[in-house]
Image (tube, rainbow, N blue to C red):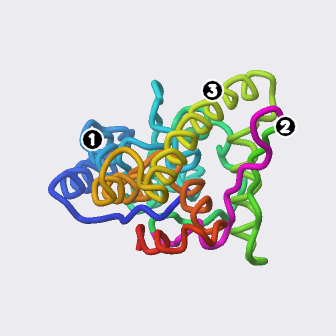
Amino acid sequence: MVKIERLESELSEKAVASLEREKAKASGSYNTPEVNEALQDMFYGKCYICENKKVTSWQIEHLVPHRGNKDLKFSWDNLFLSCAHCNNIKNDRFEPIWDCTKEDVDEHIAFRKEGYFGKDEKYLFSPLDDAIETQNTCKLLNEAYYGSTTQKQVEAKFIRKELRDELGRFKNYVRDYMYETGRTKDELLCTIRSELSASSPFAAFKRWLIRDNDKYAELLNCWK
Ligand SMILES: [Zn+2]
């Protein structure tokens, strides 16, 4: 989970207008084409919780559960793009979590992969402060990446496979950059910047690979 700016755009304006129209109806829906289009655009087609992009089932997630409250239900600032797996897990639990459109979540939580080829691999979410939002977000991330029911555990395995593949690719770019093999340094730096940006899948894990390795200190400002 990384910060995604809630920027105003033509699409977001249309989404807000559609939410106002729906809110005025007796049984309106926040699930409008305009809202879906604007959320896909704003969140770069990526689930804000697990950061996976290879998703076939999308849902609109309310950061603060609306529980029938019309203001929360139709507020653009409360709507997030989530995969069905994560939306289902979060539901109305884990309250409150960090608002990733306002907070740099990867500065509150360390996203790490432990173990390597032949060893048990484990993804860890370590709180870096005592905020209740940090604790709850860690719990949510743990369930998103590992699941708690049998079905969710199977779904989580697919997400972790994507994550592992993405991290493997990313590590190769960084190695090539450091050892100056393959493409030119400038080209690789451009790729690495894009891999570390908010739009990239699993950016929180990629950023922590850089943070955790002094050798890569020169890449620390790539996402700032
Ligand atoms: Zn997800």
Q: Which quarter shows the C terminus?
A: bottom left
* Proximity of marks 2 and 1: CB atoms separated by less than 8 Å: no
Nearer mark to the viewer, of 3 and 1: 3
Nearer mark to the viewer, of 2 and 1: 2
Left or right, 213 with respect to 40, comes to: right
Q: Position of residue 64 (x, y in %)?
A: 57, 59
Closer to the camera in the image, 113 or 9? 113
Q: Residue visible at 32% across and 40% down?
A: 36
Q: What residue would you read off at disc 2? A: 120
Closer to the camera in the image, 15 or 219? 219
| 35 within the magenta span | no
Which disc number belongs to residue 37?
1
* Proximity of marks 3 and 1: CB atoms separated by less than 8 Å: no
Q: Secondary structure at mark 2?
A: loop
Q: Residue visible at 54% across and 74% down?
A: 217
- Spatial distance from mark 3 to mark 1, Cα to Cα? 25 Å
Q: Tell me the amino acid under the disc marked 3.
A: Phe
Q: What residue would you read off at disc 3? A: 158
Q: Quadrant of ligand 1?
A: top right
Closer to the camera in the image, 172 or 131? 172
Q: Position of residue 70 (x, y in %)?
A: 46, 55
Q: Secondary structure at mark 1?
A: helix
Residue neighbourhood size for the residue with mark 1, other residues' Cα within 10 Å, grouped as few (<14), some (14–19), many (≥20): some
Q: Earlier in the sequence, mark 2 or mark 1?
A: 1
